[in-house]
Amino acid sequence: MKRANRIRKSSDFKSAIHDSFSSRTSAYLINVKPNSLGRLRIGISTSKKIGNAVTRVRVRRQIRAFFAVYKMYEKSYDIVIAAKPGFLNRTSSENRDELLKEIQALITKGETQK
């Protein structure tokens, strides 16, 4: 994932979470908000509830890999994903399918309310 497609600043995370469409699952808390940048930006948050630093980095890499495979970068949204401890209890394919399904539902919801 390119650096331009990542949310890195705390202020950007806060603005992406504020007034966004959100969804909560056993493995994720997902916030989707339209932006005016013309590109998709993704922010990933993992808390210490997930595990130690090695585990948290592994989870972030897996989530970034989900987006590398499906190339959703033509959309103009900010997506903030907070991984929850339920992420570790499932297979990678189950996590990927659930994440992409929820994001597509939130983007569709956002496009219908424009």
Image (cartoon, rainbow, N blue to C red):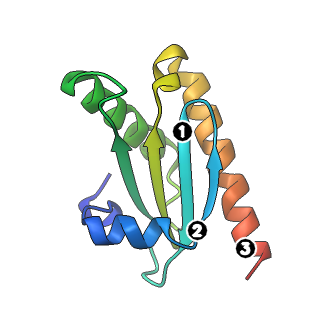
The amino acid type of the residue labelled 1 equals: Tyr
List the residue tagged with mark 1: 28
Q: Earlier in the sequence, mark 1 or mark 3?
A: 1
How much space separates mark 1 and mark 2, taking CA atoms?
Answer: 15 Å
The amino acid type of the residue labelled 2 equals: Ser
Q: Earlier in the sequence, mark 1 or mark 2?
A: 2
For label 2, the SS is loop
- Across the whole image, how many numbered discs are drawn on residues? 3
How much space separates mark 1 and mark 3, taking CA atoms?
Answer: 22 Å
> In the image, residue 47 lies at what x, y percent?
33, 36
Vertical arrangement, residue 5 with respect to residue 65, above or below: below
List the residue tagged with mark 2: 20
The quadrant of the picture occupied by the C terminus is: bottom right
For label 1, the SS is strand
Asked whether residue 20 appears in the rendered view, the answer is yes
How much space separates mark 3 and mark 2, taking CA atoms?
Answer: 12 Å
Report the residue that reaches farthest toward the front.
Answer: 49
> In the image, residue 15 lies at what x, y percent?
42, 73
> Mark 3 or 2, which is nearer the eye?
2
List the residue tagged with mark 3: 111
User: Residue at image x 48%, y 65%?
Assistant: 17
The amino acid type of the residue labelled 3 equals: Glu
Report the residue that reaches farthest toward the right.
Answer: 112
> Mark 1 or 3, which is nearer the eye?
1
| Left or right: 84 as drawn, with respect to 25 | left
Q: Earlier in the sequence, mark 3 or mark 2?
A: 2
| Left or right: 107 as drawn, with respect to 33 | right
> In the image, residue 20 lies at what x, y percent?
58, 68
Report which quarter residue 5 is drawn in: bottom left
User: Residue at image x 73%, y 54%?
Assistant: 105
| Left or right: 3 as drawn, with respect to 65 | left
Asked whether residue 75 appears in the rendered view, the answer is no
